[in-house]
Amino acid sequence: MDAPEALREFLMYSIANLIEHPKQASIGVGHTASGAISYRVQLAPEDVRRVVGKNGFTISAIRSLLNVAAHKHGVK
């Protein structure tokens, strides 16, 4: 499994355990002009607040974990 797909699976696992409607969640993978991998997460409207968390702390923690995992795979 390549790095972008492994990171997408990790992200999906992390988010699916937080939300009530995991079947409505989807994650798109893209690349920026600088070569970094970007992910776009689409959720049911009532699940967004669970992922963002109070003052954005939950999504910030998810981003930090994803950055560490990306660093281990040698990607941005």
Image (tube, grey):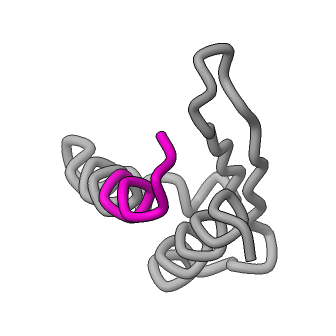
Q: Quadrant of residue 18?
A: bottom left
Which is nearer the eye, 76 or 24?
Answer: 76
| 5 sits left or right of 6 in the view | right
| 61 sits left or right of 11 in the view | left
Percent x, y of residue 35: 63, 26
Which is nearer the eye, 37 or 45?
Answer: 37
Q: Residue 71 lies in magenta, yes or no?
A: yes
Percent x, y of residue 33: 67, 14
Q: Is residue 66 above or below residue 32?
A: below
Q: Is residue 29 above or below residue 34?
A: below
Percent x, y of residue 65: 31, 62
Span colored in magenta: 67-76
Which is nearer the eye, 56 or 27?
Answer: 27
**Residue drawn at the location 26% of the way across and 44% of the way down:** 56
**Residue drawn at the location 52% of the way across and 53% of the way down:** 48
In the image as oriented, which residue stretches furthest toward the top? 33
Q: Main secondary structure of the magenta part?
A: helix
Percent x, y of residue 57: 20, 51
Q: Is residue 70 above or below residue 36?
A: below
Figure quadrant of the N terminus: bottom right
**Residue drawn at the location 37% of the way across and 54% of the way down:** 71
